[in-house]
Image (cartoon, helix red, strand yellow):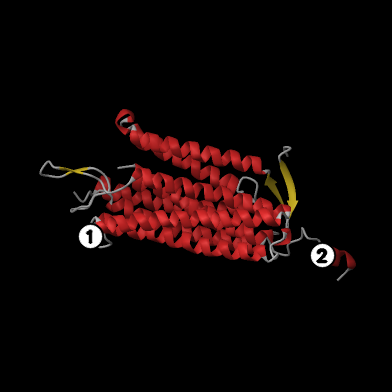
Amino acid sequence: MSSETREIMHDQHAHPVHGTRTYWIIGILLTVITAMEIAAYYIEDTLGDAATSVILTLSAAKFVLVAMFFMHLKYDNKIFTGIFLFPLALATLVISALVLLYHVLHPLR
Amino acid sequence: MSSTTYEHAADPAHVDTTTGLDSRKMAFWTFIGSECLLFGSLIATYMAYKGDSLTGPYPHETVLPDGRVVEGILDIPLTSISTFVLLMSSLAMVLALAAVQRGARGRSVFWLLMTATLGAVFLGFQAYEFTHFYHNGLTLSSNLFGSTFFVLTGFHGAHVTAGVIYLTTLAILGMRGKLGPEKSMNVEIAGLYWHFVDVVWIVIFPLIYLIP
């Protein structure tokens, strides 16, 4: 465990908690990635078809950072990760299926 | 029961469940899982009808069949600021949890109130946006974009509202000295809710605002 990570006992069980420095770094990273997302929107003409992929990749990075460090999934019991990821995968499947159905296979117009 | 068993049960690290994990936390992660499906269905509906509105106002700049170009109604700079505010509220939330775990009462109350305030500011931005859209002819029933947009962002806003009330309640408990390190699980669970609301916006923001 690094120097900025320490073990804290709270009401029920031991839980590794990062020092606040790590949280500030993640906060700065989230800000920078958001700025990059917005920049990608404004230079969409330059990026062309890659713009959507770039924006979605940056959003996925933010999602992962919040889930791993702010929600502590990186250090918590893997059962919690499973409980979160299974419905998340199901939701992603539903979204992808409807996009495929309505925009590729049977577009409304 | 032997004395060893008593000692084991009295150990603060002991959780008397089948998994050895805190039941409240397990239940809350399950709730978050169900919320993933709720927001998944709302986002799926928005995405299914994205770009299919037959009448305006349209979200982004649109070329009509007669060749006219109409401006989009979405205000990207404004929503970018509100997105930043919500992200910073997540940072404040995790700092509040760290303060509670350290037993720093003043700091924990400060960061909890900061989180709730930033959440309220986000709601203010949303209220302004909704009002602006209404005055520009976009309502729940004006077109497919209006229906799916207001339902999706409205549900998210309702979750933020519940979170602001939740966090304010915790801050009041903190002020009364009822939020010591032994109660940090209560703050951790509130934090899970708040960060989930944040990650939902992390998904919604690009899909609605940044990707035409």
The chain ID associated with circle 1 is: B
Q: Nearer the viewer, mark 1 or mark 2?
A: 1
Task: Kindly check if marks 1 and 2 are in contact, taking CB atoms under 8 A apart as contact.
Answer: no
* Residue A83 appears anywhere in the view: no
Residue holding disc 1: B142
Instruction: Give the quarter of the figure containing the N terminus of chain B.
Output: bottom right
Tell me, yes or no, if residue A96 can be seen here: yes
Name the residue rendered at 73%, 44% in the picture: A6
The answer to which image quadrant residue B12 occupies is bottom right
Helix, strand or loop at label 1? It is loop
Q: Position of residue B188 (x, y in %)?
A: 63, 57
Classify 10 Å Cα crowding around label 2: few (below 14), some (14-19), many (20 and above).
Answer: few
Q: Chain of mark 2?
A: B
Q: Residue furthest right?
A: B3
> Residue B10 shows which numbered tag?
2
Which is more toward the observer, B207 or A108?
Answer: B207
The C terminus of chain B sits in image quarter:
top left
Distance between mark 1 and mark 2 Cα atoms = 61 Å
Residue at coordinates 41% horizontally, 40% vertically from top-left? Answer: A56
Q: Residue furthest top?
A: A46
State the residue in front, A5 or B75.
Answer: B75
* Residue A29 image label: none
Amino acid tagged 2: Ala
The residue sitting at 42% across, 56% down in the picture is: B124
Q: Secondary structure at mark 2?
A: helix
* Of callouts 1 and 2, the N-terminal one: 2
Front residue of A51/A86: it is: A51
Quarter assignment of residue B210: top left
**Looking at the picture, how far across and down is residue B141, in whole percent?**
24, 62
* Amino acid residing under circle 1: Ser
